[in-house]
Image (cartoon, helix red, strand yellow):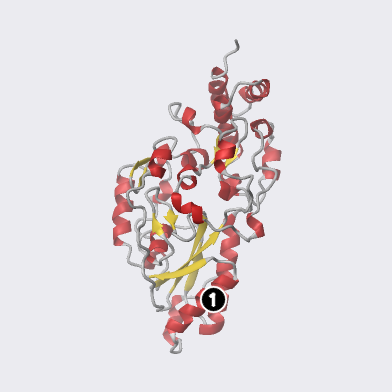
Amino acid sequence: MSSTPERAESRQPLDYVALARRIGHWARQLGFDRTGIADTDLQDAESHLMNWLDEGRHGGMEYMAAHGRKRSRPELLVPGTIRVICVCMSYWPDDPALPPEKVLGTSDIGYVARYALGRDYHKILRRRLQRLADRIEDETGLFGYRAFTDSAPVLEKPLAEKAGLGWIGKHTNVIDKTAGSWFFLGELYTDLPLPVDDPAENHCGTCRACIDACPTGAIVAPYQLDARRCISYLTIEFQGSIPESLRPSMGNRIFGCDDCQAICPWNRFAQFTDQGDFSPRAVVTDRKLAWFASWSEDDFNRHTIGSAIRRTGYEGLLRNVAVALGNAVTSMSVRRSIGGLVHHPSALVREHAKWAKSRHPRA
């Protein structure tokens, strides 16, 4: 729950420099790895967003254009906002069995983006941000704020860059040279006139590892992503039939893709998470494609409670599994799983399963 910005009129004078330092301390106590403060000037990011939308690179994500300029002008979304407190929290698990390349090299295992192996981060970060706001309010009295975690029209990556949490890399993810990129972002929009931090400097240099590693060529140029070709978009956001030309490049990725992050040299410095909520769940971590293919809708609902995987929906997940089965090394188990999906009640699942079947002709 947020206080109203109008409360600022009766606020007592505060030492905002000291308050900013305390906010960073309180955030660390709440499990956030780093904190920074940005102003609301996002003119450059707004131009980039509008060009991206004009080129249709958002695909079917109509919500990216639905809020006008509220996404790039925080004060339009939350009146009275003059600062944004940005935080990040690592999710990279300290488990040697989880390197992406190990799973991607085993074609009959379903690859799930590493961020989705634990509990859904949205509620976790929102609760921590609310506790941070409560702690600030104990110090300042009522103030205007609103918490976000990838849940509203917010340009969180440009804000994180302005707040010094990292720079936006050529793959369009935020990178920190001391912590890599395996972290979630969160924001508190606020009317407190806090001092702002220096923006992060870009350290990508001439490196193009992420561009070359993208399986579908979705990073069409440095700092330019075409979501219509991105496996994360295709397996999570996109609800329709995946273009056949892209299916072979998806491999065994059934929910998201980490290739551009996994190849990034700066992730040699990635920080392991100490948050138990992000510990991988055995029910979805590196399981056989046959396991996922056998799920009923009740199984899906039960196994994805509190998981980001639920976002793709039951039919969407089986569609993705069908594509992965089509890309797997031929085996009796693979053929049997495809055979079950070919007769699935969902036309979307059946269509992808028939494609998968065509990839495994009998000798």
Spot occupied by residue 354 in the image (x, y as percentages of width and height): 56, 21
Residue 34 visible in this rendered orientation of the protein? yes
Measuring 65% from the left and 53% from the top, which residue is drawn there?
Answer: 279
The N terminus: image quadrant: bottom right
**Measured along the vertical axis of the image, is residue 242 above or below residue 2?**
above
Q: Residue furthest bottom?
A: 13
SS state under label 1: helix
**Measured along the vertical axis of the image, is residue 28 above or below residue 300?**
below
Query: Can you tell which quarter of the image residue 113 is in?
Result: top right
Mark 1, residue position: 25
Measuring 57% from the left and 46% from the top, which residue is drawn there?
Answer: 311
Mark 1 burial class by Cα count in 10 Å: few <14, some 14-19, many 20+: some
Q: Of residues 346 and 190, which is closer to you in this image?
A: 190
Q: Of residues 66 and 59, which is closer to you in this image?
A: 59
Image-based side of 19 in relation to 345, left or right: left
Spot occupied by residue 155 in the image (x, y as percentages of width and height): 40, 58
Measuring 61% from the left and 36% from the top, which residue is drawn there?
Answer: 110
| Mark 1: amino acid | His
